[in-house]
Amino acid sequence: MTEFFNTGLSQQEFLEHYWQKKPLLIRQAFTDFESPISPDDLAGLACEPEIESRLIEENGQEGAWQVTNGPLSEDDFARLPATHWTMLVQDVDKHLPELQYLLDPFRFIPDWRRDDLMISYAPEHGTVGPHTDGYDVFLLQAMGTRRWQIGDKPIHDAELLEGLNLQILAEFNSDKEWILEPGDILYLPPHFAHHGVALNDGMTFSFGFRAPSRTDLLDSVVNSLLEHDMGKSRYTDPDLVLSEHGSEINSDAITRLKQLLHQSIDEAEPILASALGKFVTDTKSSLANIAQESLADLPTIDEITRQFDSGDSLSRNLYYRFAWAKNEHGGQLFMAGETYCLDIHGQENLPLLAENSVIKRADWQHLKKDVPSANLLCQLISEGGWNWYSESN
């Protein structure tokens, strides 16, 4: 079994004993690590208008914990003091494809659960305050050193400081404290309070994993029921008994409502994978303008064959999310919140179409043995999910 970094744990043992259960410190997960991006590079990304970024000042000109949303400007950086501030940039793994290799050790966790690689830079004393997150995160120290204090139990109803644009804990008591150096990783499950403070100029790479809320998932299921013309059963009360108060919604009515909702979920079972797939692959609003490409003409199988024969290959668009699911009829591929179906003969091609980072000529030779699979790739190319590149460039 594959070892999880140098912990002595297999990947499965990590999932069984730590994932969403308790924190784990991993010393030198990346041995002799040197950051592939500099603070100046990160600042350049933060100044780009289509890239999501933030600047957090513990003692800003406008008050404590001042938040400035990007794009940042030269004036924003010019006013900064020497210490006590943090710059954060989201989705760096998509903006800089050369950093994709950093995700490889985490690919045993479903890709559709992964959100992004966020990179933060902070000088001495830089922090975003003690807080909790509603998702799993791996914190890789990439440059400098940082002190992390964490609680040993999850907090689900934390009291926050009022009047801030940040969710900072009103009270924080740490149970453990570590100083992380480049190459060290701290894994934190959801809702564990943590507080990181830079001891010197440094960068932290945060690998976050999505955790949809119940209301988000219910909304997706309801939308899928509407799209499939399902869930039309009405509220019924054949067991109605005489009530003293005609306007009262009593406990019996609530019980019937719960039964109706449970029945609706049961009815939706055939489309639950579709509801989840569309939700988790929907493009983040902050990436929509970058991800969206003008729809090209739908290429033919012969045209794609000639392109591969010329030496070109296809690269998956990193701004789009992909997922897939099997079913009794074949399977579904999900991209950017849309669903694409294949029959039982194309089922085996779903991993290639949704998981490969590149598709080469040999892959295409296999894929086009199933015409619906080949046609699906044609459609995905026309919608910007896959892009041509020449390996000679």
Image (spheres, rainbow, N blue to C red):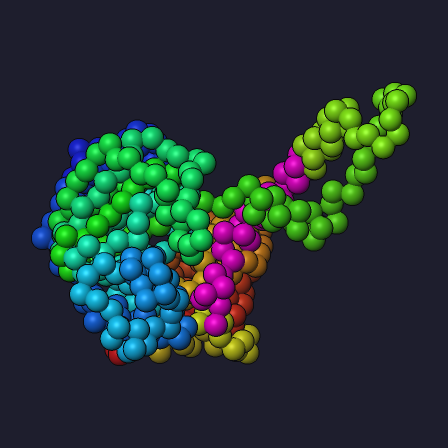
Residue at 34%, 57% in the rendered image:
65
Q: Residue 63: image x %, image y %?
A: 35, 61
* Residue 109 horizontal side relative to residue 253, left or right: left
In which quadrant is the N terminus drawn? top left
Inspect the magenta stretch and tell me whether residue 290 lies in it.
no
The front one of 152 and 83 is 83
Residue in the picture at 45% in, 65% down: 286
Query: Which residue: 31% across, 63% down?
Result: 60
**Does the rendering let one see residue 134?**
yes
Q: Quadrant of residue 247?
A: top right
The image quarter in which residue 271 lies: top right
State the residue in front, 172 or 47: 172
What secondary structure prevails in the magenta region?
helix
Which residue is at a point 81% across and 35% down the rendered structure image?
A: 235
For the C terminus, the image quarter is bottom left
User: Residue 266 magenta-drawn?
Assistant: yes
Res 345 seen here: no
The answer to which of 8 and 212 lies nearer the viewer is 212
* Residue 99 percent location from the top left of the image: 26, 62
Tell whether 184 sits left or right of 243: left
Q: Nearer the viewer, residue 308 or 158?
A: 158
**Vertical order, 128 against 302 (above or below):** above
As drawn, 347 above or below 388: above
| Residue range (magenta) | 265-289
Give the quarter of the image for residue 315: bottom left
Residue 55, how many percent across, how many down? Answer: 32, 64
Question: How many numbered dots are placed on residues in this image?
Answer: 0
The x and y percentages for residue 147 are: 18, 46
